[in-house]
Amino acid sequence: MQLLKENPSLKPYLIEAVAHAHEAGLDLIVKETPLDYGDLPENCPYTSEQLFDPNFPTGLNPA
Protein backbone atom coordinates (compact mmCIF):
# COMPACT_ATOMS: atom_id res chain seq x y z
CA MET A 1 0.00 0.00 0.00
CA GLN A 2 2.92 2.31 0.70
CA LEU A 3 4.04 1.90 -2.92
CA LEU A 4 0.67 3.19 -4.12
CA LYS A 5 0.82 6.14 -1.75
CA GLU A 6 4.25 7.08 -3.03
CA ASN A 7 3.34 6.40 -6.70
CA PRO A 8 -0.34 7.19 -7.28
CA SER A 9 0.21 6.82 -11.03
CA LEU A 10 0.33 3.03 -10.46
CA LYS A 11 -3.28 2.89 -9.25
CA PRO A 12 -4.79 2.42 -12.74
CA TYR A 13 -2.74 -0.78 -13.09
CA LEU A 14 -4.05 -2.24 -9.85
CA ILE A 15 -7.15 -3.86 -11.37
CA GLU A 16 -5.04 -5.45 -14.10
CA ALA A 17 -2.49 -6.72 -11.57
CA VAL A 18 -5.21 -8.24 -9.37
CA ALA A 19 -6.78 -9.96 -12.38
CA HIS A 20 -3.42 -11.36 -13.45
CA ALA A 21 -2.68 -12.62 -9.93
CA HIS A 22 -6.13 -14.22 -9.71
CA GLU A 23 -5.58 -16.07 -12.98
CA ALA A 24 -2.18 -17.30 -11.80
CA GLY A 25 -3.76 -18.44 -8.54
CA LEU A 26 -6.46 -20.35 -10.40
CA ASP A 27 -3.82 -22.13 -12.48
CA LEU A 28 -1.96 -23.13 -9.32
CA ILE A 29 -5.12 -24.36 -7.58
CA VAL A 30 -6.11 -26.48 -10.58
CA LYS A 31 -2.59 -27.90 -10.79
CA GLU A 32 -2.22 -28.66 -7.06
CA THR A 33 -5.75 -29.73 -6.02
CA PRO A 34 -8.59 -31.87 -7.37
CA LEU A 35 -10.57 -28.71 -8.16
CA ASP A 36 -11.24 -27.59 -11.73
CA TYR A 37 -11.73 -24.11 -13.21
CA GLY A 38 -15.51 -24.58 -13.10
CA ASP A 39 -15.33 -24.99 -9.33
CA LEU A 40 -13.65 -21.61 -8.83
CA PRO A 41 -14.72 -17.97 -9.28
CA GLU A 42 -13.84 -16.72 -12.77
CA ASN A 43 -13.00 -13.25 -11.42
CA CYS A 44 -11.52 -12.18 -8.12
CA PRO A 45 -14.45 -11.87 -5.70
CA TYR A 46 -12.78 -9.10 -3.66
CA THR A 47 -12.36 -5.40 -4.31
CA SER A 48 -8.96 -3.72 -4.34
CA GLU A 49 -9.91 -1.97 -1.11
CA GLN A 50 -10.63 -5.31 0.57
CA LEU A 51 -7.36 -6.83 -0.65
CA PHE A 52 -5.31 -4.00 0.83
CA ASP A 53 -7.28 -3.72 4.07
CA PRO A 54 -5.15 -5.26 6.87
CA ASN A 55 -8.37 -6.06 8.78
CA PHE A 56 -10.03 -7.94 5.92
CA PRO A 57 -11.64 -10.32 6.48
CA THR A 58 -12.93 -8.71 9.62
CA GLY A 59 -11.47 -10.10 12.79
CA LEU A 60 -8.27 -11.64 11.44
CA ASN A 61 -5.92 -8.89 12.57
CA PRO A 62 -5.67 -9.07 16.38
CA ALA A 63 -4.19 -5.57 16.65
Image (cartoon, rainbow, N blue to C red):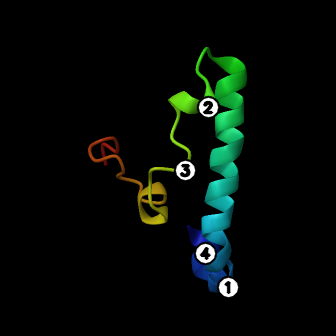
Q: Residue at x 62, y 84 (%)?
A: 8
Whole-Å distance between the Cαs marked 2 and 3?
A: 11 Å
Q: Is residue 35 left or right of residue 23?
A: left
Q: Is label 3 in a helix, a strand or a loop? A: loop
Dot in front, 2 or 4: 2
Whole-Å distance between the Cαs marked 3 and 4?
A: 23 Å
Q: Is label 4 in a helix, a strand or a loop? A: helix
Please name the amino acid that badge 4 sits on: Leu
Dot in front, 3 or 4: 3
Q: Residue at x 63, y 81 (%)?
A: 6
| Percent coordinates x, y for residue 2 in the rendering | 58, 70
Please name the amino acid that badge 2 sits on: Tyr
* Residue linked to disc 1: 9
Whole-Å distance between the Cαs marked 2 and 1?
A: 33 Å
Mark 2 and 4 residues: CB-CB less than 8 Å, in contact? no
Q: Quadrant of residue 11?
A: bottom right
| Percent coordinates x, y for residue 38 in the rendering | 56, 31
> Of the numbered discs in the image, which one, if any, rests on residue 37?
2
* Residue linked to disc 3: 43
Q: Earlier in the sequence, mark 2 or mark 4?
A: 4
Q: Earlier in the sequence, mark 3 or mark 4?
A: 4
